[in-house]
Amino acid sequence: MKKSRLPIYTFLAVFLSIAIVGVFVVPFLLNTLRHIYLELQADVNYRQARSMAQFIQKQLDDGQPESKVIEDFQASIAGMQFDRGYVCVVDQESINYLCHPMVQVLGTSVANKMALYDDDFDGANFVPWERLIRAGQSGGGLLHYETEPAQPDEIVYFYSIPGVNWTVSSHENSERIAQEINALSRITVIGSLLFALFIAFPISFAVRNVNRRYENQILREQEKSDHLLLNILPAPIAERMKDQETMIADHYAHVSVMFCDLVDFTPFSANISPEKLVGFLNTVFSEFDKISEEFGLEKIKTLGDSYMAVCGVPERTKDHARPIALAALEMLATVKKIDANLNVRIGIHSGEVVAGVIGTKKFSYDLWGDTVNTASRLQSHSPEGEIHCSDSTYELLEEEFDFRDNGLVELKGKGKLHTYSLLGPKQ
């Protein structure tokens, strides 16, 4: 469809749709929904009957004699319009109306009026209402008086009050509801044609504008989703997940992994408030994030006061040791700028890793392999304020950086390993 013809097609579609709905569908639905409308009205009657029953029950609980209770109840309903609805109290033993807004009904027996009741609102399963009242039952449905054919059917909800053998019933004229539905149906047919004629054209443009706003909103939400995904995952990995790649696991033969840990952070954290603790960590790790981005590192995760990053993942590169060494030196300097008394331990190891995404909800991008474990051990055994490197990292950097040879160092779980402390670039 050409965009220039969109208003015309929209106009025709809206006009025909509204006209068909108004002329054929709405009257049919109104008639179909009549049953639901009656049930809704019965629910209104239920609430009214229940509130009146609670009113009576409270007076009885307060010690009021039954005659006084009935008198007060009659006074409370004296202003009701009989043609619109009314509430009454029926005695379950005598089946007599004890109170009613129409004086001539008082004392009349439900049995004499031959009130028939149907809880399906379809008039197909009428039962004597008096039988249900005598049984002390409660319920809502349609009420029909056989002895008074001129009186329209009523929507009723009757509520049994335990202890006094009384039933409160709330009534509503069903014929008035039917008339209102029929009148509404006629108005709908005429109004829908006029409405379709005069509203279709502006609606056609409104639909187009709404569609544009909706598309823009989808784009904005997509951008938010993409931004959130990029905050969790590296950009190439996020793109692969958006392409419905379900299993992401890659082998990298040449990478450098770094762990950085704050020294004596546990006793430090015990002496400050949670808010200051989180704020402090946010300051430090935010600076580390900037450094990682500057030197092309990929932050993997933070765990407590430990920061893990890698170079060579997910973008493969042969020059992975140099950027991570420069970033480590920058982190040492940055920590001192934040707090002169703060120190870190950093461990770097170069080798192979497996990288991938785990989890289905709070998924994360992580690394596995001996290179990761060795870098972690180097960090934990590093002298304070130094960058502890393995011999594999040293071999990649010895021509550009100065090192101090630490000799063989016993690493937990790794045995003795020849390590070096990175001092800085060669002058």
Image (tube, helix red, strand yellow):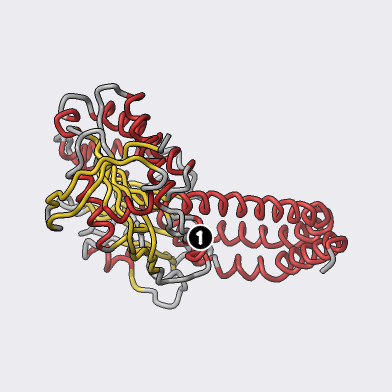
Residue picked out by circle 1: 236
Let me know if residue 103 appears in the view: no
Above or below: residue 77 compared with residue 343? below
User: Residue 337 occupies which quadrant of the picture?
Assistant: top left
Let me know if residue 194 appears in the view: yes
The secondary structure type at the circle numbered 1 is helix
Name the residue rendered at 29%, 65% in the picture.
130
Residue 278, given in percent of the width and then of the height, sits at 29, 32
Looking at the image, the residue that sits furthest to the top is 340
Name the residue rendered at 32%, 59% in the picture.
109
The one of 46 and 309 positioned closer to us in this rendering: 309
Residue 85, given in percent of the width and then of the height, sits at 46, 50
- Total marks shown come to 1
Residue 92 is left or right of residue 212, and the answer is left
Residue 213 is left or right of residue 260, and the answer is right
| Type of amino acid under label 1 | Pro
Residue 208, given in percent of the width and then of the height, sits at 75, 55
Residue 83 is left or right of residue 29, and the answer is left
The quadrant of the picture occupied by the C terminus is top left
Residue 237, given in percent of the width and then of the height, sits at 47, 61
Name the residue rendered at 77%, 62% in the picture.
14
Name the residue rendered at 40%, 58% in the picture.
156
User: Residue 26 occupies which quadrant of the picture?
Assistant: bottom right
Residue 85 is left or right of residue 392, and the answer is right
The one of 15 and 108 positioned closer to us in this rendering: 15
What crowding class fits label 1: few (fewer than 14 Cα within 10 Å), some (14-19), or many (20 or more)? few
